[in-house]
């Protein structure tokens, strides 16, 4: 039941009181309906105890492997060490584990999902709307069991304690313990596991890592991967306020106030506008619903007396609450992979590089990769690199980390905040092929082709350019005729772009290019300078799919176009027109961000 | 009486000639290049890359000019059908070598060669139409109108491009706006294009 009644809340409280007595009971299957989220007093004992479970369905997209899945309700503790109930999803690939030893487990810490109850990851994983599905599917495809905590406050009718790092970290650690109690799930208490998260999930993963020794010393965690991590809430708050990611600041205030009502007394601090917006955000908004309406908003709009961020942070209890989320105060006890987008417009890069310094000073084994793009792109671009790095740790390979590095410290290349939300594609490698219909063969554009564009999500526009160096290709005309070709862009690639509230990206644009034949390999086929298509070839660049496609290499523009007749090709103009022009020319352009750099 | 008989004989002869002519004209004979007198000189054919490489610039230019000239001679004749057993005159020896090699890579080489030959002829007719003026341009325009549906059907010409070409040709051929609209509508129907009244 997503909007829990007072009676149910009372029952839950009674349950927790009962649990504190230390009585134990075997986990039982829970009901199939919404009452699953209102467990009766069947659980007791320590955090990590499974209250109940049930079979679950998942929809992680067409590329996801078959899994067996469960929803779970389990015991954990919040940031103030009060017992709570948390829900989550446990997924185990149907295919047997083919690696050595026990099947490894990924404790996946989710990024911001939004404060409404319907945003809970377990609900979105079930209905196919979870924007992190691509990363979950990638981890499952690697053969790992994947555990996804909903984080405290979801599905229970409460307000999520969003960004309360300790609570989130403990919830992730406890889910592992709970998952080992599901009968026949095959998740061993001694299985090697890793904690992986990005953004809010990066904070969660780092907190979980720091808490390992004290909170879950028996877990066999071999590594932590945390990206886009808000490690210093003061710096991050200033970065978000009045900027593209202002909605995250608003949600952070609500979430932290829920966990620390004395630290952030919302009723006293929020003005009427603020209270109204808090009600809106918590009532029915998920992350993309919230992103746009609050973009570039200053928190002063929502506070009593229009106090700005400096005034709010001057309040001791507020300042203390934010500082309680500080990471890097403990040594990371296992090897850690840290990563950040250099153009991140939501979470500042500098405070994350400072976190690396702090961990290194505590002799942690840390590797840091800098990705070239912004926040959302990096989340999905990084997945294969993260999984490769974690795979090496599961395989027992050592890592030296990069605490000692001679590479220069990265500095932010983010687009300035306060304006439009622009995702820049800066010289992204273009993997392109054109299937010539008449010759029935594929021409692959050179590997150093690239696409540079600004996708202005606010204005809904795409504006970019293609770069395709001259290249030679073998055409099946006479034996394999070596033909020199140029693809010369005409004008700019332009169109419309949108990102909807379900995280679905849509691009509708057009690239145009002249195809030029520069030479052919036989002397009798003389090609004069200027031999080209008589008008530019249209390449519609249309895409519709999840926003994860921006980063994970699945941003593909494909279609069928027509090559016009050729002109200025001398004596053999008609011959080349015959061989190359006409409809039915298929093309596929895939763009993906450049590779990360290690620092 | 004699005069009457002579008249009947004259009428019978004329009728026979007309019937014979009609039979010859209407009979759906396969139109091979040889039968149309369009076949190129076999002695000019080249069969290897080495032979092609040995051609001088002047020879290549002459062969291409000869093929272009022959293209004009095919006005009114329909597309070739498979098998095309010898080089049509409007296909130069080098072009013939290339087309045969390309067609040979297809699963149905004979049909592919016929399609390539027809596409090449159409391409040359378009080029000639663009370069000529006057009556010859008008005749080439009429030829293009006849050939366009086949090119569309063979997927050698996009429907939109075909329709645009029809419009350009008819704009020149048919000066009367009403007649032009009617013909454009007819031509558009032949390639499956929905024609809107007032277009053109």
Image: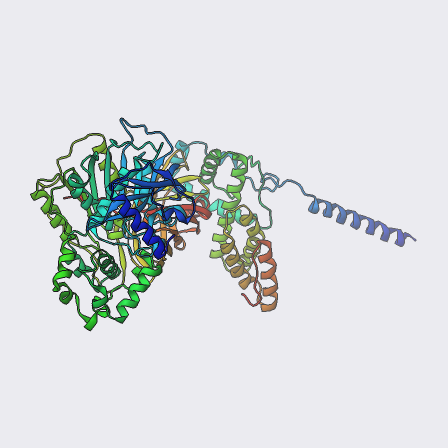
* Image quadrant where one finds the C terminus of chain A: top left
Residue occupying image coordinates x 58% and y 45%: B79
Q: Position of residue B135 (x, y in %)?
A: 55, 59
Would you identify the image quadrant in which residue A401 lies? top left
Compared to residue A129, the image places residue A305 above or below, namely: below
Q: Residue lying farthest left?
A: A361
Would you identify the image quadrant in which residue B183 lies? bottom right
Which of these two is toward me, A52 or B183? Answer: A52
Q: Is residue A582 left or right of residue A230?
A: right
Q: Position of residue A143 (x, y in %)?
A: 32, 34
Q: Is residue B40 visible?
A: no
Q: Position of residue A59 (x, y in %)?
A: 40, 44
Which of these two is toward me, A269 or A381? Answer: A269
Residue occupying image coordinates x 11% and y 64%: A314
Would you identify the image quadrant in which residue B54 lies? top left
Q: Residue lying farthest bottom?
A: A305
Q: Is residue A556 left or right of residue A597?
A: right
Q: Position of residue A400 (x, y in %)?
A: 12, 35
Which of these two is toward me, A338 or B168? Answer: A338
Which of these two is toward me, A372 or A214? Answer: A214
Q: Is residue B80 visible?
A: yes
């Amino acid at each position: 039941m997503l909007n829990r009644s007072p009676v149910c809340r009372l029952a839950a409280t009674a349950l927790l009181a009962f649990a504190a007595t230390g009585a134990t009971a075997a986990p039982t299957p829970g009901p199939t309906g919404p009452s699953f989220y209102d467990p009766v007093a069947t659980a007791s004992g320590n955090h990590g105890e499974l209250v109940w479970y049930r079979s679950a369905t998942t929809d992680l997209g067409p590329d996801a492997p078959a899994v067996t899945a469960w929803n779970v309700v389990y015991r954990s503790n919040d940031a103030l060490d009060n017992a709570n109930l948390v829900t989550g999803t446990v997924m185990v690939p149907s295919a047997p584990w083919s690696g050595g030893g026990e099947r490894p487990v990924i404790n996946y810490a989710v990024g911001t999902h939004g404060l409404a109850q319907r945003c809970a990851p377990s609900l979105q994983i079930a209905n196919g709307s979870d924007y992190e599905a691509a990363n979950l599917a990638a981890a499952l495809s690697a053969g790992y069991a994947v555990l996804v905590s909903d984080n405290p406050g979801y599905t229970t009718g409460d307000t999520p304690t969003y960004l309360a790092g300790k609570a989130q970290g403990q919830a992730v650690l406890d889910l592992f313990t709970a998952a080992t109690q599901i009968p026949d799930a095959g998740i061993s208490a001694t299985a090697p596991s890793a904690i992986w998260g990005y953004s809010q999930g990066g904070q969660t993963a780092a907190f979980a890592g720091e808490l390992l020794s004290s909170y879950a010393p028996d877990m066999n965690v071999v590594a932590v991967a945390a990206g886009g991590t808000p490690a210093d809430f003061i710096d991050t708050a200033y970065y978000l306020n009045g900027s593209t990611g202002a909605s995250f600041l608003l949600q952070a205030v609500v979430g932290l106030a829920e966990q620390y009502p004395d630290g952030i007394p919302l009723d006293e601090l929020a003005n009427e506008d603020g209270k109204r917006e808090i009600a809106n955000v918590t009532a029915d908004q998920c992350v993309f619903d919230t992103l746009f309406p609050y973009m570039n908003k200053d928190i002063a709009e929502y506070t009593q007396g229009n106090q700005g961020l400096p005034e709010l942070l001057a309040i001791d209890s507020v300042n203390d609450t934010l500082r309680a989320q500080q990471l890097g105060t403990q040594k990371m006890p296992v090897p850690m992979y840290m990563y950040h987008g250099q153009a991140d417009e939501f979470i500042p890069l500098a405070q994350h590089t400072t976190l690396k310094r702090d961990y290194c000073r505590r002799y942690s084994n840390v590797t840091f990769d800098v990705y070239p793009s912004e926040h959302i792109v990096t989340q999905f671009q990084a997945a294969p690199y993260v999984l490769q790095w974690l795979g090496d740790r599961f395989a027992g390979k050592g890592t030296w980390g990069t605490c000692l590095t001679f590479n220069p410290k990265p500095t932010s290349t983010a687009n300035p905040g306060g304006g439009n939300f622009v995702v820049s594609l800066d010289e992204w490698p273009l993997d392109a092929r054109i299937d010539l219909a008449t010759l029935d063969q594929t021409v692959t554009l050179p590997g150093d082709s690239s696409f540079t564009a600004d996708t202005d999500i606010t204005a809904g526009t795409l504006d970019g350019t293609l770069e395709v160096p001259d290249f030679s290709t073998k055409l099946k005309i006479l034996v394999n005729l070596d033909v020199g070709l140029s693809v010369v862009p005409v004008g700019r690639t332009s169109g419309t772009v949108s990102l909807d509230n379900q995280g679905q990206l849509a691009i509708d644009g057009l690239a145009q290019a002249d195809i030029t034949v520069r030479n052919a390999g036989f002397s009798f086929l003389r090609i004069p300078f200027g031999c080209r298509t008589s008008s530019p070839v249209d390449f519609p660049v249309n895409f519709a799919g999840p926003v994860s496609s921006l980063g994970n290499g699945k941003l593909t523009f494909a279609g069928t176009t027509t090559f016009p007749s050729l002109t200025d090709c001398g004596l053999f103009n008609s011959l080349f027109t015959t061989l190359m022009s006409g409809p039915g020319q298929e093309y596929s352009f895939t763009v993906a961000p450049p590779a990360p750099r290690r620092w | 009486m004699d005069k009457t008989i002579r008249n009947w004989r004259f009428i019978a002869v004329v009728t026979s000639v007309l019937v014979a002519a009609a039979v010859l004209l209407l009979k759906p004979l396969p139109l091979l290049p040889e039968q149309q007198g369009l076949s190129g000189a076999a002695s000019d054919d080249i069969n290897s890359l080495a032979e092609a490489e040995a051609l001088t610039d002047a020879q290549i230019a002459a062969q291409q000019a000869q093929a272009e000239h022959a293209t004009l001679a095919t006005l009114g004749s329909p597309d070739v059908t498979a098998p095309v057993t010898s080089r049509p005159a409007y296909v130069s020896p080098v072009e013939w070598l290339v087309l045969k090699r390309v067609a040979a890579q297809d699963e149905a080489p004979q049909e592919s060669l016929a399609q390539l030959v027809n596409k090449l002829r159409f391409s040359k007719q378009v080029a000639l139409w663009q370069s000529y003026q006057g009556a010859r341009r008008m005749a080439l325009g009429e030829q293009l109108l006849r050939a366009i549906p086949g090119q569309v059907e063979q997927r050698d010409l996009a429907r939109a491009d075909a329709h645009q070409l029809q419009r350009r040709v008819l704009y020149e051929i048919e000066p009367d706006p009403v007649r032009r609209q009617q013909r454009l509508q007819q031509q558009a129907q032949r390639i499956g294009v929905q024609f809107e009244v007032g277009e053109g």
